[in-house]
Image (cartoon, rainbow, N blue to C red):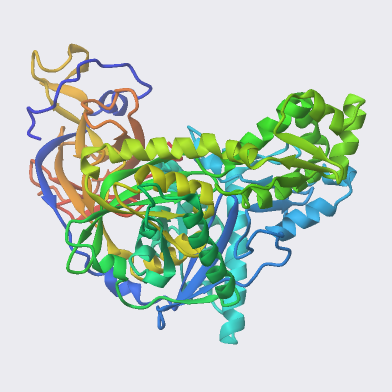
Amino acid sequence: MSESEGGAADAVSTSTYSSPAKSLGDPGITPLSPSHIVKDSDAEDAVEQLFLVVVAIDFGTTSSGYAYSFTKEPECIHVMRRWEGGDPGVSNQKTPTTILLTPERKFHSFGYAARDFYHDLDPNESKHWLYFEKFKMKLHTTGNLTMETDLTAANGKKVKALEIFAYALQFFKEQALKELSDQAGSDFENTEVRWVITVPAIWKQPAKQFMRQAAYKAGMATPENPEQLIIALEPEAASIYCRKLRLHQMIDLSSRAPVNGYSPSDTIGTGFTQAKEHVRRNRQSRTFLVENVIGEIWSELEEGDRYIVVDSGGGTVDMTVHQIRLPEGHLKELYKATGGPYGSLGVDYEFEKLLCKIFGEDFIEQFKIKRPAAWVDLMIAFESRKRAAAPDRTNPLNITLPFSFIDYYKKFRGHSVEHALRKSNVDFVKWSSQGMLRMSPDAMNALFKPTIDQIVQHLSDVFDKPEVTNVKFLFLVGGFAESPLLQQAVQSAFGSRCRVIIPQDVGLTILKGAVLFGLDPAVIKVRRSPLTYGVGVLNRFVEGKHPPEKLLVKDGTRWCTDVFDKFISADQSVALGETVTRSYTPAKPSQLVIVINIYSSEQDNVSFITESGVKKCGTLRLDLTGTDTSVPNRREIKTLMQFGDTEIKAMAIDVATSKSVKVGIDFLNY
């Protein structure tokens, strides 16, 4: 952008940012000439080999786990030790994402251990303990996330979210290091581990940064050595694993021959039964061999072929469209990750709504507060029945009501649970004499419907996008992908457009892919930038083009203030490690400090930093004092932004003296 090219804004909203020029008392910087350098990965590759092991943590909304691989034998992925206290009907290759703090707010336990201990506490005692579950969604749903954001425990008390996330990550760090030390027969040091933490691709930048800060607090890496920790995007990790799939490691829903153009649900059912059997046989072994080959499905793909990964978990559903780039089979993200809060938690909410309809919202609210452990019990009972729901099921699903539910209801209402069911007009839920809610299969399927409909609708919207034509495969992954109801819905909606593939042990796909990503982070070559980035500059004021209120006259020169000088646009393709460079000069030659403010926006077209939605996310301060007087009159300040990873780095260099400053883009502290 030359000095005269500061694009005018149609409407300038007043904003919390005062003009950088006016507030600093000097005129800031003005563009010299733009240049654009694409950097090939260089010295950083030399650092890669220092780690002995890659440990990936899949920090899920409902359950979490870790897996690891030694860099010397990358074809072996080890899934963590089995957890104590698993639930009937639910695989325990992961542990519930639940955490318990003592009444003094110190870490007590995580996962099944936390849940069981909390559950066994006397009700009078349990109300002093702080129990958290399904707290990861808070990072997605909080609009203005900061380091101070709170989470609310089951007893209503608040704790800083950063502390809870750091405790959870520290738990996994200690578990993994202990397991590695046991295997190695000597103490394993944290410095020998490269950590990978997976996050949903649709998370906004502050949430991704928050996860990194929590990991620093947990002692996994440090801001001085950020390369030790990779924040991986869940569907990308799944994508990396799916390319290695052999035919016996997946279920191809589309390969079942349709009968008269209609694919009966029982064929999906039988394929699913075989898959379950396969998983059951494999469950005893915790080591997965990943052959160093491209799987058969992949070998059918040609340069430029597209596929979509739908990662359906507990909290969110993430969709990413990738394209193959040969010869190395690198991946290019074609379409910015989209999705929403349509995870399997939605089914739990529907169940809760059903209970409110039968027993009254006031009772359910009170019961959750007064008997929190019994509420957890009820949701565990529901979870295992939820996993038994299938399109072709004919017999009812029984959900055991905890005794304290039946007892508390009688005290609260003065009549029995059975009476409430009779009175509620919910005819598809009956009371069985064994103290259970009997739900008809249709009733259970109805609980899934709103969530599945949202997923299918969102996928339809994605398929309608011009960049998503000719998709060859749809990989359905994540814990919720184990649901035959979701499988059938996706197959019947999209089976005619592409092949729907489900990896076996689908709940561990992301975990294994994250390990592979940690072993070779360069496999994803091109991403879409989620935001527009730029810096605030001054341009020469042009009458009729720039708004009069932006005019600043300084030493006889007329400047337009608050101009947004763009580095990269939202949704633009960015190669990993790509560096964009701009050159600036101090608007006033005598300036002793250069302050460059970095801004971001979700909009593509941004003209001024004062427009709504523009947020400050970094500041570079370059001290020019004490430099030689022979500095040229038009001093060049080079500003570089490096994109592509989940982290963005910025740097300013004074070309005359080679002085430089660096900063990581920060979405949480501005």
Residue 274 vertical position relative to residue 60 in the rendered view, above or below: below
For the question of whether residue 28 can be seen, the reply is yes
Residue 588 vertical position relative to residue 98 in the rendered view, above or below: above
Question: Observer-nearest residue: 258 or 290?
Answer: 258
Residue 423 vertical position relative to residue 451 in the rendered view, above or below: above
Residue in the picture at 57% in, 66% down: 173
- The single residue placed furthest to the front in the displayed view is 260
- The image shows residue 577 at horizontal and vertical percentages of 24, 57
Q: Is residue 651 left or right of residue 131?
A: left
Q: Is residue 194 left or right of residue 400?
A: left
How many numbered marks appear? Answer: 0
- The image shows residue 527 at horizontal and vertical percentages of 27, 51
Residue in the picture at 51% in, 54% down: 266
- The single residue placed furthest to the bottom in the displayed view is 185
Q: Is residue 600 left or right of residue 585?
A: right
Q: Is residue 409 left or right of residue 110?
A: right
- The image shows residue 197 at horizontal and vertical percentages of 47, 59
Instruction: State which quarter of the image contains the N terminus.
Output: top left
Instruction: State which quarter of the image contains the C terminus.
Output: top left
Residue in the picture at 17% in, 56% down: 304
- The image shows residue 407 at horizontal and vertical percentages of 90, 37
For the question of whether residue 209 can be seen, the reply is no
